[in-house]
Amino acid sequence: MKPIYVLNGPNLNRLGKREPEIYGTTTLAQVEDMCRKAAGERHLRFHQTNAEHQLVDWVHEAIDEGAGIVINPAGLSFRSIPLLDALKMFPGPIIELHISNIHRREEIYHTSLVSKVATAVIAGLGPRGYEVAVKAMGDMIEPGS
């Protein structure tokens, strides 16, 4: 059975400390724990990076080894053509995830390049959105994948 990739972009390593009025006080380690519980028996690869090239490399790895991608590209959502191009190559479902409701924030956050290739988008559920996304991905993946 191929794993679900949960990929996190820049500054998400600061969850729990960064702008708690927007992102809450849940840490990335707690988010990872929620994701692993939500995945149940399915293997999960959970990564975070502040480097665009590393995120692209993990998408490339998922192209070869993954069943689905849950991705919170953070600020790269709005400017990363390399990430968009990598995600276009992924043959399975992609869920784009944002902790905050990007559509209620400043205009710079309203247009995500990643949304153009995502199968689904979850925004504004806080850190619990990860749990929802992983469970939904489990339902979206072809049986036996």
Image (cartoon, grey):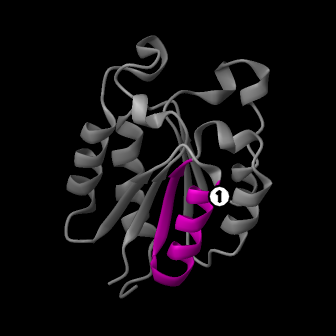
Give the main secondary structure of the magenta stretch: helix
Residue 68's place in the image compared with 10, above or below, is: below
Residue at 62% x, 74% y is: 90
Q: Which residue is mark 1?
A: 118
Residue situated in front as seen by the camera: 116 or 136: 116
The span shown in magenta is: 53-72
| Picture quarter with the N terminus | bottom left
Percent of width and height locating residue 50? 54, 43
Percent of width and height locating residue 135? 34, 57
Residue at 75% x, 59% y is: 82
Viewed as shown, does residue 25 lie left or right of 59?
left
Percent of width and height locating residue 35? 29, 51
| Residue with the most extreme bottom position | 144
Residue 115's place in the image compared with 43, above or below, is: above
Residue at 46% x, 76% y is: 66
Whether residue 126 is visible: no
Residue at 49% x, 17% y is: 22
Q: How many marks?
A: 1
Looking at the picture, which amino acid does disc 1 mark?
Ala
| Residue with the most extreme top position | 21
